[in-house]
Amino acid sequence: MNAPANPPDENHAALLGRLGSRSIVFVGLMGAGKTAIGRKVAAMLALPFIDSDQEIESVSRMTVPELFERYGETEFRALEQRVILRVLENGPQVLSTGGGAFMNAQTREAIAGHGVSVWLKAELDLLMDRVSKKQNRPLLKSADPRAVLERLMGERYPVYATSNVTVPTRDDRKEVIAMEVVDALCRHFGIDEAAATGEVRS
């Protein structure tokens, strides 16, 4: 088998070089796959992976739904902002954020300063299918979760669209989406990725 002109390892090394101390930050709605895809991308690039919701839970010793219930969304967002700002000081790494995190202007500013934002863009049906399997979504405690998701898409998608990179996600293998994220990041940094994907398509 002929080696591609620019092997993935070289592209990954180039990508890590361009990143420097910045983090790759996943944004998007709940159910878009930020944690699952983020873990895969971190493994591909040999970077640490951090989930901001897990960080918040370990800092507060409460689950996200408990925090919402006890303190309300405004307090939760303030805590989320502090946690993300602290985590961003420790790049390079891959960070997945909660669906509402990127809506906070100061958090967006911090991500822009210390990271590269990747929006996993998902269709409503995919999100509904995924979130309906989990009961831990405080914002979806509603008689009509689909309407809530539609409203959130209307509010958040224009803001998510300001991310550095947008990658459409779908019901495909996590490895495939993760490869597409790395490809998109390489393109964002002007790294030639044309030949690097040949060895993964199966």
Image (cartoon, rainbow, N blue to C red):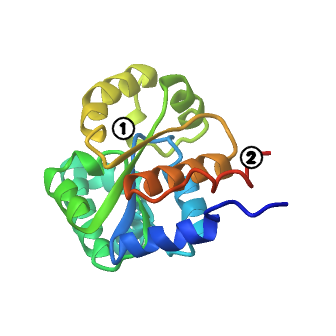
User: What amino acid is at disc 1?
Assistant: Leu
In the picture, the quarter occupied by the N terminus is bottom right
The residue under the point 64% across, 35% down is 171
Q: Is residue 91 left or right of residue 198?
A: left
Q: How packed is label 1: few (under 14 Cα within 10 Å), some, or many (20 or more)?
A: some
The residue under the point 40% across, 27% down is 149
For the question of whether residue 56 can be seen, the reply is no
Which mark is in front, 1 or 2?
A: 2
The residue under the point 40% across, 66% down is 57
**Above or below — where is 121 with respect to 164?**
above
In three-dimensional space, the C-alpha distance between marks 1 and 2, rounded to whole angstroms, equals: 37 Å
Callout 1 secondary element: helix
Residue 131 is labelled as none
| Disc 1 target residue | 139
The residue under the point 37% across, 68% down is 23
Q: Quadrant of residue 22?
A: bottom left
**Above or below — where is 183 with respect to 85?**
above
For the question of whether residue 9 can be seen, the reply is yes
Callout 2 secondary element: loop
Q: Position of residue 21 (x, y in %)?
A: 33, 77
Q: Is residue 98 left or right of residue 168?
A: left
| Disc 2 target residue | 201
Q: Position of residue 104 (x, y in %)?
A: 19, 50
Q: Is residue 160 left or right of residue 6?
A: left
